[in-house]
């Protein structure tokens, strides 16, 4: 039985020009966002920031989906693991511009009037209000960056290890008097089988 699915709707493979182009576009957009975060001063600068952030989210979602789905079906896929790690490092670079952005919003006295001043900002009203609310829980910019970088080798690394172990772990079970070696994930799913 083939346990993989076609991901061609995302990318043909990791060596595809479209995958490389999107990785490059994401790297450029992250650098652009960092520059825009340094110049936040008015509604127009926030508009430009939000448009770039939306582009980053679209690109990173597609790239992460491809990496994660590839890794989910084959945890020995080193290219999937390598590209996912590269994405984690790249997206951790969003911490500084996001912190600057949230600090700018925190200083606004009337976020509703600020949002109402722009048709583009109205599209992002929920994100802007939530970011302003979350700003009160921010650490300093340096501490936020440190926490982001540490999560790559901390919680995210543990998650990857758990995925690799779970996907490769097998056990022998007795099914209808016959001993079978099955992946632990299949055995866990038997807990929900009406006739185990």
Image: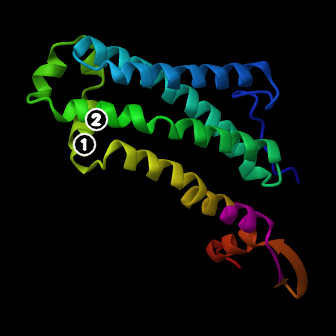
Q: Position of residue 76 (x, y in %)?
A: 83, 54
Q: Image check: 38 left or right of 31?
A: left
Question: Which image quarter holds the N terminus?
Answer: bottom right
Label 2 SS: helix
The question of residue 14 being in magenta is answered with no
On screen, residue 195 above or below 41: below
Question: Which image quarter holds the C terminus?
Answer: bottom right
Do the CB atoms of the residues marked 1 and 2 lie less than 8 Å apart? yes
Q: Quadrant of residue 61?
A: top right
Badge 2: few (under 14), some or many (20 or more) residues near its Cα, within 10 Å? many
Q: Quadrant of residue 111?
A: top left
Magenta residues, as a range? 161-172
Q: Give the image's coloring scheme.
A: rainbow
- Please tell me which residue is depicted at 19% across the width and 36% down the height of the picture: 106
Q: Position of residue 35 (x, y in %)?
A: 42, 20
**Main SS of residues in magenta:** helix
- Please tell me which residue is depicted at 27% across the width and 11% down the height of the picture: 44
- Please tell me which residue is depicted at 22% across the width and 34% down the height of the picture: 129
| Front residue of this view, candidates 7 and 76 | 76
Badge 1: few (under 14), some or many (20 or more) residues near its Cα, within 10 Å? many
On screen, residue 111 above or below 164: above
The residue that mark 2 highlights is 102
Q: Position of residue 96 (x, y in %)?
A: 41, 36
The question of residue 169 being in magenta is answered with yes
Going from N to C along the chain, the mark reached first, 1 or 2, is 2
Picture disc at residue 135: 1
């Amino acid at each position: 039985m083939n346990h993989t699915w076609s991901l061609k709707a995302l990318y043909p493979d990791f060596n595809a020009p479209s995958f490389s182009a999107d990785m490059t576009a994401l790297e450029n957009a992250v650098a652009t966002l960092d520059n825009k975060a340094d110049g936040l001063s008015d509604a127009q600068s926030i508009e430009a920031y939000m448009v770039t952030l939306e582009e980053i989210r679209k690109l990173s979602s597609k790239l992460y989906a491809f990496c994660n789905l590839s890794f989910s079906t084959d945890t020995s896929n080193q290219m999937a693991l390598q590209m996912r790690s590269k994405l984690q490092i790249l997206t951790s670079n969003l911490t500084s511009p996001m912190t600057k952005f949230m600090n700018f919003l925190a200083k606004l006295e009337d976020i509703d009037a600020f949002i109402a001043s722009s048709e583009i900002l109205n599209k992002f009203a929920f994100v802007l209000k939530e970011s302003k609310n979350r700003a009160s829980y921010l650490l300093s910019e340096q501490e936020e960056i440190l926490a982001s970088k540490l999560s790559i080798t901390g919680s995210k690394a543990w998650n990857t290890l758990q995925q690799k172990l779970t996907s490769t772990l097998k056990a022998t079970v007795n099914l209808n008097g016959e001993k079978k070696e099955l992946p632990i994930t299949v055995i866990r799913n038997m807990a929900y089988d009406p006739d185990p």
